[in-house]
Amino acid sequence: MIIRETKDSFIMIRQHDHAFLSGETIKHLKPSLLKSDSFFNDALYAAYQHDRSWIGLDETPIWNDREKIPFTFSDYPLLPKLAFYKIGVDEIERVNTYASLLCSLHFCSFFSQSEKKDCLVFLTGEARRQMKLKESFPDLDEELLQQHFHILQFSDNLSLYLCLNEPGVGKEDEHPWFRSGFKNTEIFHPDHQPLTARWMNENEVTLDPYPFDKDFHVSLQYKMVSKSLIEEVGIAEAYTESDMEEKKIFFHQ
């Protein structure tokens, strides 16, 4: 679950809905930015599906007693998170081998600096998976694979930018992850700088430079869950009782 706290409520966004935005944005990437159009549809599938491991977890939010907020994707207990990451990649692998390779690389990047035993076990298992998956592509273009990996990272981060920031926020007040731009996007910038995003107003976003081939809009689904309702009935029931809402966000050059 992706959480943004307000004075009286928590804005709660399911991970799979966030991933849908990842695909909806990156499908408009300028073809001229791609090394090749080979496997792009597979990379797009990875963007749409990369957080399907959270579908079951997000059905019933759980409360973080220490922080006094619902658990989020970043602080969710490690063991179930790792287990469900593996399940998610397993499910993607049954449908699209190349996309599962990208998602495996993506998840491993989250834990690449960790020395925790459970993370190291996860990384070892995924390294074996990646070697096995690469056998399906004897002529694999490693440079293209890396570009697709960076595209997946960008799609994830751009969607998180939409989810974690208050619409219309000034650059100086953005979530700290994004104030200096999106990591690993230098390959899409003529001066080899990170791409940066900016809210033009509460409904419109632009990027510098603009990496998409046209203006478009996406629809963000979320629930606004009242803190008073959580106190009354608990987080799980409060989330169930809250209505799903939708916000349209427009991308303009």
Image (tube, rainbow, N blue to C red):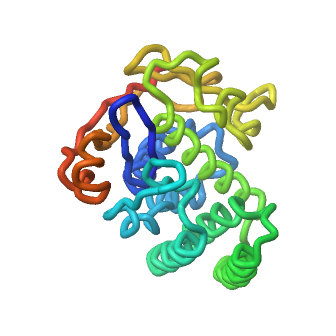
Looking at the picture, how far across and down is residue 83, in whole percent? Answer: 55, 77
Asked whether the viewer can see residue 58, the reply is yes
Asked whether the viewer can see residue 145, the reply is no
Side of 111 relative to 20 (left or right): right
The residue closer to the viewer here, 231 or 97, is 231
Q: How many marks?
A: 0
Quadrant for residue 191, please give it: top right
Task: Tell me: residue 229, above or below residue 161.
Answer: below
Figure quadrant of the N terminus: bottom left
Name which residue lies at 53% across and 35% down.
161
Quadrant for residue 103, please give it: bottom right
Looking at the picture, how far across and down is residue 84, in whole percent? Answer: 50, 74
Side of 59 relative to 159 (left or right): left
Looking at the picture, how far across and down is residue 7, in whole percent? Answer: 39, 28
Task: Tell me: residue 45, above or below residue 34.
Answer: below
Name which residue lies at 73% across and 30% down.
189
Looking at the picture, how far across and down is residue 134, in whole percent? Answer: 69, 78
The residue closer to the viewer here, 109 or 73, is 73
The residue closer to the viewer here, 130 or 190, is 130
Task: Tell me: residue 164, above or below residue 138.
Answer: above
Name which residue lies at 46% across and 68% down.
53
The residue closer to the viewer here, 28 or 56, is 56
Side of 129 relative to 222 (left or right): right
Name which residue lies at 27% across and 40% down.
228
